[in-house]
Amino acid sequence: MSIKICGIGSFNPERIITNDDFAGIMETSDEWIYSRTGISSRGYASGVPTWKMGVFAAKEAIKNAGVDPSEIGLIIASTITSDFFTPSVACLVAGELGLFCPAFDIGAACSGFVYALDCAERYLRTDNKLKYALVISAEMLSRYTNFNDRSSAIIFGDGAGAVVIERTEGVYGSYLGSDGAGGKHLFGKLPFPAYPFYEYEVTGMEDYPGPENVIIQNGKEVYKFAVKAMPAAIEKAVAAAGLKIGGIDFFIPHQANIRIIETAAKTMGIPLEKFIVNIKTRANTSSASIPLALCDAVREGKIKRNDIICLCGFGAGLTYGAMVLEY
Ligand code: UT7
């Protein structure tokens, strides 16, 4: 069994923040940001909550799939930037769509879209009554950006992507992994009040003191992880699909840094043209970056029906994962 993406949707914020805008509030430059990351500009949600971005993307994906919303039997949303710790983004989307199916969020950071799709595939495989599943990634990184940290602030953007999937026969392979010991290199502390009954201990996170409620990143460590995790996940997912790297038409990597993508491509001996890259204008939107890149590539006519695509995510957790399927 495999899954088929029968509809895609996205939400890209109207408010665009350029590298020059950053140069106006911190010591940086368009030249530094673009040459180190491949990013020129990013969208900031500005008033549109995370769940609402998810609703826009979901409605577009359902319309694009040409299915009646009532036929959706499962909603999984991936986010690390929810508006509420409860209810979930998935439930809020279900409410807007008037659906009563299972709806829940998963947190796997920038790997979240691949994790959520993998999860939905398992539902479709084991529940014959389920016809369509909706998978959404909605992220508002601007809400958790530390504007006092110029090395991390400049990489993030906001947006949401969604897909409607159904069961099909065809090529499929998936691989998910994690490296929890590396979690200290990319994390965000919640502003918990003092615990009356529990002690909690952080291991390693104290090495990177920083304010609460913002993303704290050791860019160099995450970079080192990413350039190894990407090829490892891709190779395992491609093998699980019974294919060779050459059998993949397009790779859609998490859009974290163009240099990570270039290094991974070189390591695997894959021409860079086979990688979908939209980081220049979308920046790093965590789990939303893969579905946003998919949407852009389909709309540009680059990815076409029956192309074999390989999605690959990596990020906080640390987590990583890849999936091979036919578009
Ligand atoms: O999506 C989640 C996964 N995240 C990632 O994959 C991120 C992976 N890491 C990266 O993409 C890169 O590490 C960054 C883009 C975040 C940072 O680039 P870097 O080349 O690792 O820079 P750095 O933080 O090591 O800083 C190098 C130099 C430092 O100056 P000195 O100490 O060499 O004098 C920084 O102070 O560049 C300086 N610097 C900046 N200069 C101008 C750092 N950020 C900036 C900036 N503008 N925005």
Image (cartoon, rainbow, N blue to C red):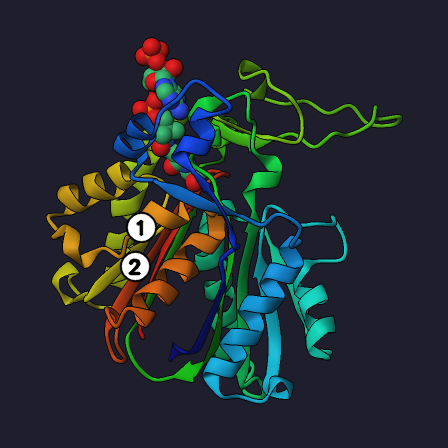
- Do the residues under discs 1 and 2 have CB atoms within 8 angstroms? yes
Is the residue 207 above or below the residue 144 in the image? above
Q: In this view of the protein, can residue 325 be seen by the observer?
A: no
Horizontal and vertical percent position of residue 148: 55, 20
Is the residue 146 above or below the residue 252 in the image? above
* Amino acid beneath label 1: Ala
Q: In the rendered image, which quarter is residue 238 located in? A: bottom left
Q: Of 179 and 221, which appears nearest the observer? A: 221
Work out which residue is located at the far right of the displayed protein and give it. 196
- Picture disc at residue 250: none
Q: In this view, does 63 lie to the left or right of 274?
A: right
Q: Which residue is drawn at 46% across and 23% down?
A: 150
Is the residue 27 above or below the residue 72 in the image? above
* Amino acid beneath label 2: Ala
- Picture disc at residue 233: 1
Q: Of 181 and 230, which appears nearest the observer? A: 230
The picture quadrant for ligand 1 comes to top left
Q: Is residue 59 left or right of residue 89?
A: left
Horizontal and vertical percent position of residue 232: 27, 46
Q: Of 11 and 173, which appears nearest the observer? A: 11
- Picture disc at residue 237: 2
Q: Determine crowd level at label 1: few under 14, some 14-19, many 20+ residues with C-alpha closer than 10 A.
A: many
